[in-house]
Amino acid sequence: MNKTMKWEKLFNLFCLILVVGGSIVFWWPTRELPYWWDSAGFIMHGAKYYLETNFQSFILPSDSAISAMAHPPLFSFLLALTWKIFGQSLLVSHLFYLPFILLAGIFAYLLGRKMANANDESIRCLTGILIFLFLFFSPVFLAQVGIIYPEIPVAAFALMAIYFFFERRAMPYFLSASLMLFMKEVSVVVILAVLAVIFLRHLSKFFRTRQIDFKVVGKELIIFGSPLLLLVGWFVWHKSATGWMFAMPYYQSRFSQNVFTLSLQSFVFVLKFFFFDQGRFLLTIISPILIFFLLIKKEGRKSLFREEVFVIFLIAILVPLLFGKLEFLNRYIIFGLPFFYIFFFFLLTSFLKSKIAGEQVTIFGIITFIILFSFHSSWDNHREIKEWHFSPLEENLEYRDVINIGKQMVGFIERYYPEANIWTAFPSNYMLSQPFQGYATKTLRVHNCKDFKAGEQVDLIVFDLLSPTQRDCLAMIKAFNFTILLPFGQNGKWLQVYKSP
């Protein structure tokens, strides 16, 4: 091994260490954070079901609090196994989540480095680090570092699958793509992008040579499309075990409406969030300019029209388009973001390839500082909630405001009203009634406002505007003429405790 190759390997290792260390730095403040929203609901209840039934069945029960949709439950299953081995606690749950965060950072770096159109090893490694920073500085991604959801694992395995596809390593690709699908089935668009590019490559070859080897085409499509067979098998198994395939009968009409209707407003909303919100408008504005300058040069066109580039581009486009069609929450697009950033830096490195390394680093530094500052400015918007709010506050770090005031509210009631009959709704109901969620130290007497019947005792009502389910609590407050005992608030978010007169 010559000195140059040895230096490149050492530099690459140094960059990887920086990525691993940086990932841990972003994760560290979340290690004792209580559970939030669907993590507290679907994920934790699913894991508790496995633990309490001693893993008797992989398929979760048809329950709107656990398994309203036929999402493959691998994430909750693995969390339950971790609890079984190490015990159930907030720290154990966040430690379980840490490897997925590390994988997302490492493979964002590796794929970004691989896609960087640069001759200099230091520029390739720098590109990988910048993509890692872009991803972790993205408010919607950073928020999920502290919320134990499948979104970051899906992003990690999507990056791994594409990396191994580019390396033509069939078995690692199959494993990572299969894990990706069993974390969340909508990630199927990643595999569809791979298959589309394989098909287009052979179609292009046919138009050039008028020849096509169907055996080769079929073999590639089967190898790289094989994880889809596992996903189909899951839904068939789920149908045979539960009687429904995709959504509980209760949600079937809403599911069908999302699948079989088109809404321009939904597409605009999702595309706006993916490409323009939280500072990403800078990348969206710069990217077409870079494409234009690459297209007017022969070498630039040659760089653009590569299979790898088209895969990355296609995933970055298909992810927001998918959720423009389906039900959408801001966190859903996370597994598409790293591909958007990788595509941007591919364009930038291609445009700057003719410049010397020092000039490239300077330009990288200026652009990175501006964009990361823009990302950082959206970490905490501190919106004031004055009317019913949905979807959940989880596209940035604002959700921590609600967690903080939730802990204050629960602590107050535990200290001064430990025997009270408390009526509330989601999300404060799980904060008060389920100690394992990280808010209460004991189970309090909590009832859901929608279940209230005349004559039942009401001592306290906990009310907020974070979920429409709280409307029943508001009706009770008005009916009983309750007055505010104490409001808990932080940065425009609040929970109010009402006391019986």
Image (tube, helix red, strand yellow):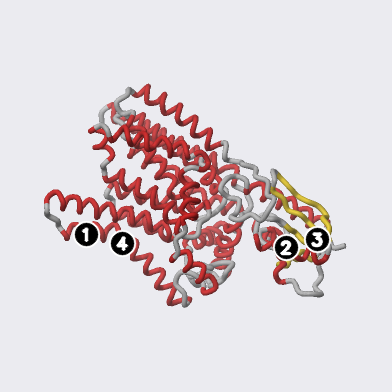
Q: Nearer the viewer, mark 2 or mark 1?
A: 2
The residue labelled by disc 4 is 226
Mark nearer the N terminus (1 vs 3): 1
Secondary-structure class at tag 1: helix
Residue 368 at x, y = what percent? 46, 31
* Spatial CA span between label 4 and label 2: 47 Å
Query: Depth check: 465 or 68 in front?
Result: 465
Considering the image in quadrants, where does the N terminus appear? top left
Q: Point out which mark residue 151 bears.
A: none
Identify which amino acid the numbered label 1 is placed on: Lys
Name the residue rendered at 36%, 56% in the picture. Answer: 175
Name the residue rendered at 43%, 61% in the picture. Answer: 185
The residue labelled by disc 2 is 424
Horizontal side of residue 102 vs 434, given as left or right: left
Instruction: Determine contact: label 3, label 2, CB under 8 Å.
Output: no
Residue 15's place in the image compared with 190, above or below, is above
Q: Nearer the viewer, mark 4 or mark 2?
A: 2
Identify which amino acid the numbered label 3 is placed on: Pro
Q: Residue furthest left?
A: 210
The residue labelled by disc 3 is 418
The residue labelled by disc 1 is 219
